[in-house]
Image (cartoon, grey):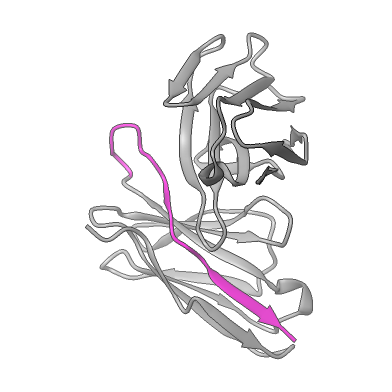
Amino acid sequence: DAGVTQSPTHLIKTRGQQVTLRCSPKSGHDTVSWYQQALGQGPQFIFQYYEEEERQRGNFPDRFSGHQFPNYSSELNVNALLLGDSALYLCASSFERGQGNTIYFGEGSWLTVV
Amino acid sequence: GQQLNQSPQSMFIQEGEDVSMNCTSSSIFNTWLWYKQEPGEGPVLLIALYKAGELTSNGRLTAQFGITRKDSFLNISASIPSDVGIYFCAFRDDKIIFGKGTRLHILP
């Protein structure tokens, strides 16, 4: 049973470019959340998707957008990249009606903006 | 917004020693979560606490939900090299709010 899988694992982008990160949730999970973890910090919530809609959003600008597909997989898009967007981007999944509703994290995508 | 204060920021200990770290908040929480993150990995849930005063163990790990509901501690007994990593306290409000973490280093 595959856990949460993310791609790519590492990437380097230039300021002003756009990036798309991908996430496949754990089998059976229907809710996907994205977090940004800067170096030396805890993960910060970006947004959550359920039933292909953004359900909740953290304190991130509109440059950060996402999408959830019918198969529950998700994408995180960041436009007009800034140096400060360099971070580990974590995807987490859960089952909305699951007992205990445990959240599982992927290994993350390391984004470096130069 | 709600903030979690973790201490210490980092710890350097000898293998075999016991470890204690804690987390405080100005807000009252209904759950406390403890996660561990190893290099190159995402956070993994270690222990979840749901009731004030609750004391829960998971192997060598023990965590308690403070009576005031504003604090929690995590203890690790007889540390081993694979305990190295970053330990985060967190609470859940649909999303998860993390503290800044305690970095545990084990000296050879």
Q: Identify whether B15 is placed above or below A56.
A: above
The residue nearer to you, when weighing B67 against A64, is B67
Magenta span: helix, strand or loop, mainly?
Answer: loop
The residue under the point 53% across, 32% down is B33
Q: Quadrant of residue B78?
A: top right
The residue under the point 71% across, 24% down is B27
Q: Quadrant of residue B23?
A: top right
Q: How many numbered callouts?
A: 0
Left or right of A66, for residue A12: right
Residue A100 is one of the magenta-drawn residues: yes
Task: Indicate the position of residue B82 as horizontal and vertical percent values.
Answer: 51, 45
Task: Indicate the position of residue A12 as horizontal and vertical percent values.
Answer: 63, 86
Residue A51 is one of the magenta-drawn residues: no
Which quadrant does the N terminus of chain A fall into?
A: bottom left
Q: Identify whether A38 is placed above or below B22.
A: below
Q: Identify whether A7 is placed above or below B33.
A: below
The residue nearer to you, when weighing B41 against A19, is B41
The residue under the point 70% across, 91% down is A14
Task: Indicate the position of residue B80 as horizontal and vertical percent values.
Answer: 54, 38
The residue nearer to you, when weighing A71 against A7, is A7
The residue under the point 57% across, 17% down is B64
Q: Identify whether B68 is placed above or below A111.
A: above
**Part of the protein shown in magenta:** A96-114
